[in-house]
Image: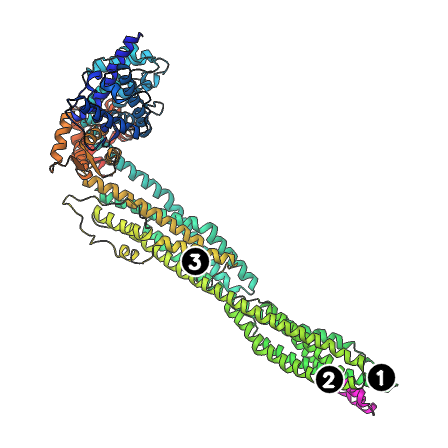
Amino acid sequence: MAHEEWVDVQKNTFTRWANTYLSRKRLEIEDLYVDLSDGTRLIALLQIICREKVCRKHNRKPRMRIQKMENLNQAFAFMHKKNMNLTNIGSTDILDGNQKLILGLLWILIKTFQVAEIDVEGVSGKDGLLLWVNRSLVDYPTIKVKNFSDSWANGMAFCALIHRFYPNLIEFDQLQAVNAIENVRLAFEIAENKFKIPQLLNLYDVAGIVKPDEKSIMTYVALLFKEFASGQQKRKAVVSIAKAVNIAQRHQELAKEYETLAPNLEKWLVSQNENFEKLLEESAAISNLQDVRQALAQLSDYKKNEKPSQEAAYVAVEGCAGRWLSSCRNNGRTLPILTPPIEQLQALKAKLEELETTYISNLQKYSETFQRTEIFLARVVTELEKIEAWSREIATTKAFEMDLNETSTSTEAEEKLESINFIKQVELPRYRLLLVEVLEQSSSLATDHAESVTVLVRIDAMKAFLESVDAKIEDIHADCVCKLKKQIELDGVVKDCKLLMRNLKYTIEGLDEEIGAVAKLKDTSKNGVETASRYFKDVLLPKIDSEIVTEYYKLKQKKQILEEAQRISDAQLIEKVHLRVEKLQERCTETRLFFERELAGAASRDELCHEFATLASSIKERCAKSTQAINNVVGTVAEQFTSMKDLMESLFPSPDSGLTVPPSVDGEIEPTTVADDAIQESVQPSSSLVHEMESLEKVNEQLEKLHVFTNPFTVETIHELRAQYNSVEAAVRDKVKSLEKELALCQLGNLTPQQLTEIKEVFDHFDIDCDRKLERDEFIMACKGLGLALSEEECHDAFDKMDEAGNEEITFSAFSEFGAEQLQSGSSMEDVKTAFEILTTQNLTTSKLEEHFEPNIVEFIRSHLDQLGNDGNTLDYEKFAAFMFEM
């Protein structure tokens, strides 16, 4: 292309591009090199494409060169502020009409803002048209329209647009992107022959061109837009019929879901009721703690692995029934008969929960009884084993085997007398007293415990043994006293010392064992720790003072006598007793500190268990009430929505929930007066269900760290509560979303959910400064984004009508009402009949169905054609409308 031709093409293209924007201000450039020189149109162009003020004030009718220069300087200052690269281009160049630099400036503007528009989808007239194109081609994933240049070069986008609105005119699946010329020729010929759209573009200016002229493509696509938008009325009719079909399909899906889930749930509930009745009968035969723990473990596994999924299924069945019945009521359908009835499932579930609670209560009762028995049994066995060990030791003592006549020296007789005296005066009374304690403790053993019977037999044997030893030791002692005539006083002291030391040794050992036994906590509950601590403080410590400290004081007195008599070796033996006494005192100090720590830990565990039980009870109750509230909500759609929104905000508060109640036909919604009491009760607590569940998770985490897996204050588990919480959250959010869409459709003239969403998305898209208002040029682009077939003058007239205050802006409320008026379609039975009359003046055949409806709608109508048709191939819309509103 010659240089002159290139310059002319650019001048014309850039002029058309600038006029596209300036037309919004009703301005126009006739000669690009002349009309930009005074700066007014350049400032206006910058203000439109940048969506902000270029300067506070400028000269709108400059006549002098200096006035024109001031305008241009303000425009260039603004462009520099926007970081535009204007190297070698200045105000003087524009004022003097430098053609090359003027074209360069326009190219910089196009390049900068065209790329920006593609990135953020822009706000110009081109963007409104591009938005419409992309919305129209959303179901054509292979067509990617990013601009109005190379995206159209292969002709596929043109053909896709025609196929989108008139699928019977083009076999789109047979087209190939490589056949650019054939694709463009096909689209242009159909557009001209079918829709009278003139072929403004040369075939070879588009097909196969690396980058076709953008403005020409835009102009041609705008003609397509205008033509296709005129079919809006027919699409409204299609929407009315599709809505009725969709409701029927949704009811079929809900029926299928209920028929799939409910029988299985009923079968499981019946089976578990029978199972727990059997477990309750079998629990009466439990005779030991191991069986109780095994039963509790099986119950925990059931609640953790099996029950949560069934709890979720129950909530799903309740939600399905609630949605089905609610949808039938809200859409004028006959209420279905549920099989099995939801009331029957609720009764089975209530019975199962009652059986579970009774079974758990019985197991906890058995556990408490057998634990107490085993604690006493452990003490009895420990003391009994001491007596049995002593009986085996005493049976082999020489004092019972040797004849006193064999004693040849006083020393031997004295040693034997010491042995006998020790047995008679120390060991026999000690173990006799120990046996008394064993007999007292054995009275607390449960007679139905398996090990108790064996222990009682052993106690009787030891009682008989001690009686035999008592009789024999008296005879031996009497003989020893007769043989001993003299005792040296010092020997007597030594004997006393040895007796005291031996007594202290066994006493210290016994007390040390008792301290060790009481410190081995088998019951780590607060009550168990307090019992062991009291026993240590009230029994063992006084016993140490009376049996150790007092006797050791006597021993120290005798040590002084031995030291004065130079019995150093005997006196040194007493030092060993001193070390043992100190060690026992250190053990007492350690044990006291141990009980202080354990008491603190036990109190913390009990407090956490109480807190878990309280939260679990609250969460379960709120979940049950919330589920009841969701399924039993009544009133108008607005009242149901208000109740459900309040319920959701109280349970799952969110500062950005985005839920608002659109104004009703009369302008406002009256507060709910017929809402179920369960809804009011479920929103009363000051803390949200989210907060309570988070608190419960934290308490459960602390209990797991403390290895607490059985809570004596509740039968609920974290797994059940999580399942209930998640199910309630999903149910209430689904309910609110469903009611919100239904309410919006009621308030905006029966719009489809897609149309309602489209109005909001288009408004937000063109509300650049996010002030919830649209200016005049933003409103015009939004109308194009909605696909409305309005001329620019019609858009101006509509804007002026809505802008009564003359503020040059309209609110979202006004825009949504305007959009609803343009897009709304009814969904009553009469609307469906009227929709058929709009589509065709004659009977609607199955072949014509494919021209207007999606394949899933066509398939649904075909499947019921025997009920809806006249002759098997023609649809009777009277029958069709009646059938839709019976479902």
Q: In this rendering, would 684 be left or right of 268? A: left
Picture coordinates of residue 737, whole percent (x, y): 29, 43
> Of the residues shown, which amino acid type is indicated by label 3?
Glu
What whole-number distance in Å separates the C-alpha atoms at marks 1 and 2?
18 Å
Read off the magenta span: 474-495
> Of the residues shown, which amino acid type is indicated by label 1?
Glu
Picture coordinates of residue 146, whole percent (x, y): 33, 24
Magenta stretch contains residue 489: yes
Q: Secondary structure under badge 3?
A: loop
Picture coordinates of residue 405, whole percent (x, y): 86, 86
What whole-number distance in Å separates the C-alpha atoms at marks 1 and 3?
73 Å
Residue that carries the numbered disc 3 in the rendered image: 716
Picture coordinates of residue 60, whole percent (x, y): 15, 26
For mark 3, does the 10 Å Cα neighbourhood hold few (<14), some (14 to 19), or many (20 or more) residues? some
Residue that carries the numbered disc 1 in the rendered image: 412
Residues 252 and 787: in front is 787
Q: Earlier in the sequence, mark 1 or mark 3?
A: 1
Main SS class of the magenta portion in the image = helix
What whole-number distance in Å separates the C-alpha atoms at marks 3 and 2?
59 Å
For the question of whether residue 99 can be seen, the reply is yes
Residue that carries the numbered disc 2 in the rendered image: 424
Q: Earlier in the sequence, mark 3 or mark 2?
A: 2
Q: In this rendering, would 536 be left or right of 203? A: right
Quadrant where the image shows the N terminus: top left
